[in-house]
Image (cartoon, grey):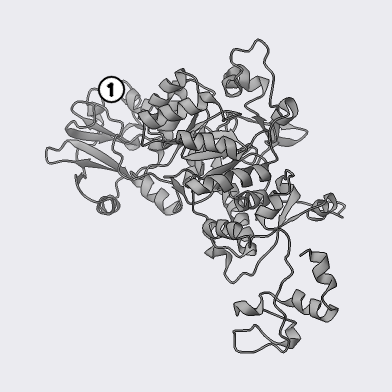
């Protein structure tokens, strides 16, 4: 029944009562009519006017909307609000980025060389998301970045950097420079498992001018230790009581088994949502390609401790990616792999059959991507996410919406279309943690941002992502540009998360599971926006205005 014909058959007074009702009478839930006519039903006072059951649908159910044969972007859509009866702090954003890896927040940073290196990956993981380190670099460089992330925040550090008594202060400073810490256990062999003889910290070396002397002359030998087999809570208590910065863990033979850092206790307090593996280390992802040498890259990354890999390709439905997925799952069965990029259910079928643990959706929709313009191939992002997620959900495979995210409203829309997580590039570029240096142009502080399909990025090595490494003429599928300074991830990500939570609250859902259930039930309602409606939904009719991110 069309909305218009239904309205034509309803009298104006009855229609007004229908408009005023929040829930239909059959559900027996709280609803509000005109304040003069009564108070919320179910709270002690019956309303004077009882509304007729609502049989006039607002907006479209997802299946109805996306089945119209048109492609929709996030800006084409608006979500209709639903009844809410909970505070915004009740909203929880836990989600799966892969079949087996769960995050506290549905956000990951894109594997682009102007977005994610170790600083971004660390910051994203500390705030409950994850970073995916780009591979537009050597194998050694990428593995080193993964290693730094995995070592940054630990519970029990099972493989701490160690030195021998004959090592020099220069060796201590080299470890500090590379890994960012200087509390180094000293064992008789200089390796993990050797007999613990001392420990060197900042206070032992800061005022020593001769950096060539042996650490045996400056190390602390009177040690506070914990025994192998103690719990993390017991070890943390010893560390707090002793007021030491590092706590070595030893066995009955006084051989070094592990290490605990005071700074890790503080990080646990300051970042309660941090994404951690079973060993309490930060979760970190990394991108790889589909070439033969990427198998060597994969081996090195797994040794560095990477938690999952993303096969980075502009068109993921290829025989090359299928073979790479099959190789990964047969060689490293415990390693989760995300395939993509794709935009159709048929593409998803091929990768799911190959064994992927997650799907990356998006083609030509990023702010610096020109694939749709150059190749005439792709799909509007909202339609792509809906269709792939609808199919992938049957197999329990999470979908990452990659590209087209310009604000928190777009994140809410992506998740409402079925995504379990969003991947952000331009949204995070320009932050302090993104690679690159700031520069000023016309008085505005900027940072460089480029697509991995740009000539500049392909010259450095990313042409393999676009199957162009052997091409005589490189055809750009991206551009290089600059983005405005966004400050630190420490303030920016909490602002994004709060905006997403408010969106969930307005939709009347407390979790991503609730949101996806409403989508499948058809009770999550969308409406299409005209150009005028899109203009109306933004800031307008002002001579000038300021738009701060947060206060």
Pick the front one: 19 or 187: 19
Quadrant position of the N terminus in the picture: bottom right
**Residue that sits furthest to the top in the current view:** 472
Residue positioned 70% across, 27% down in the render: 479
How many other residues sit within 10 Å of disc 1, few (<14), some (14-19) or many (≥20)?
A: some
Q: Horizontal and vertical percent for residue 358? A: 50, 40
Looking at the picture, does residue 450 appear above or below residue 503? Answer: above
Res. 341 image quadrant: top right
Residue positioned 47% across, 25% down in the render: 323
Looking at the picture, does residue 167 appear above or below residue 92? Answer: above
Residue positioned 68% across, 25% down in the render: 477
Quadrant position of the C terminus in the picture: bottom right
Q: Disc 1 on helix, strand or loop? A: loop
Residue 448 in sight in this render: yes
Looking at the image, residue 472 sits to the left or right of residue 263; the answer is right
Residue positioned 73% across, 52% down in the render: 77
Q: Which residue is mark 1?
A: 213
Q: Horizontal and vertical percent for residue 104? A: 48, 51
Q: Horizontal and vertical percent for residue 379? A: 69, 37
């Amino acid at each position: 029944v069309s909305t218009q014909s239904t309205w034509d058959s309803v009298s104006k007074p009855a229609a007004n009562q229908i408009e005023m009702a929040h829930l239909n009478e059959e559900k027996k839930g709280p609803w509000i009519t005109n304040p003069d006519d009564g108070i919320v039903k179910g709270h002690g006072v019956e309303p004077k006017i009882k509304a007729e059951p609502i049989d006039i649908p607002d907006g479209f159910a997802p299946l109805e909307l996306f089945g119209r044969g048109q492609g929709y972007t996030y800006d084409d859509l608006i979500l209709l609000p639903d009844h809410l009866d909970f505070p915004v702090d009740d909203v929880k954003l836990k989600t799966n980025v892969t079949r087996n890896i769960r995050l506290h927040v549905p956000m990951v940073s894109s594997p682009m060389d102007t977005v994610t290196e170790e600083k971004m990956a660390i910051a994203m993981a500390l705030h409950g998301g994850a970073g995916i380190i780009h591979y537009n670099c050597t194998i050694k460089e990428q593995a080193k970045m993964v290693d730094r992330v995995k070592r940054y925040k630990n519970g029990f550090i099972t493989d701490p950097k160690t030195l021998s008594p004959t090592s020099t202060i220069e060796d201590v400073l080299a470890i500090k420079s590379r890994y960012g810490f200087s509390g180094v256990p000293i064992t008789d062999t200089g390796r993990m498992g050797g007999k613990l003889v001392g420990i060197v910290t900042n206070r032992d070396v800061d005022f020593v001018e001769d950096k060539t002397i042996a650490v045996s002359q400056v190390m602390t030998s009177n040690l506070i230790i914990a025994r192998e087999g103690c719990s993390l809570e017991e070890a943390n208590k010893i560390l707090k009581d002793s007021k030491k910065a590092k706590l070595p863990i030893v066995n009955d033979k006084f051989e070094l088994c592990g290490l605990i850092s005071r700074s890790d206790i503080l990080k646990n307090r300051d970042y309660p949502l941090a994404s951690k593996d079973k060993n309490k280390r930060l979760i970190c992802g990394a991108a790889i390609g589909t070439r033969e040498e990427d198998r060597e890259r994969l081996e090195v990354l797994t040794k560095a401790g990477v938690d999952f890999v993303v096969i980075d390709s502009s068109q993921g439905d290829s025989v090359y990616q299928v073979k790479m997925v099959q190789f990964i799952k047969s060689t490293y069965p415990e390693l989760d792999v995300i395939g993509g990029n794709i935009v159709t259910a048929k593409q998803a079928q091929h990768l799911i059959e190959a064994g992927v643990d997650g799907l990356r959706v998006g083609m030509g929709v990023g702010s610096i991507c020109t694939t749709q313009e150059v190749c005439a191939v792709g799909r509007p992002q909202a339609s792509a996410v809906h269709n792939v997620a609808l199919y992938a959900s049957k197999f329990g495979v999470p979908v990452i919406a990659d590209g087209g995210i310009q604000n928190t409203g777009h994140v809410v829309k992506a998740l409402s279309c079925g995504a379990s997580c969003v991947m952000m590039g331009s949204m995070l570029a320009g932050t302090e943690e993104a690679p690159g240096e700031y520069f000023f142009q016309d008085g505005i502080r900027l940072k460089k941002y480029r697509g991995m399909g740009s000539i500049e990025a392909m010259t450095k090595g990313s042409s393999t992502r676009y199957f162009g490494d052997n091409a005589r003429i490189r055809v750009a599928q991206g551009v290089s540009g600059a983005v405005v300074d966004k400050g630190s991830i420490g303030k920016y990500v909490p602002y994004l998360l709060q905006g997403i939570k408010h969106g969930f609250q307005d939709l009347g859902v407390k979790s991503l599971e609730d949101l996806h259930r409403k989508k499948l039930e058809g009770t999550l309602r969308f409406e299409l926006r005209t150009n005028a409606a899109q203009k109306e939904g933004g800031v307008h009719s002002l001579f000038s205005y300021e738009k701060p991110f947060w206060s």
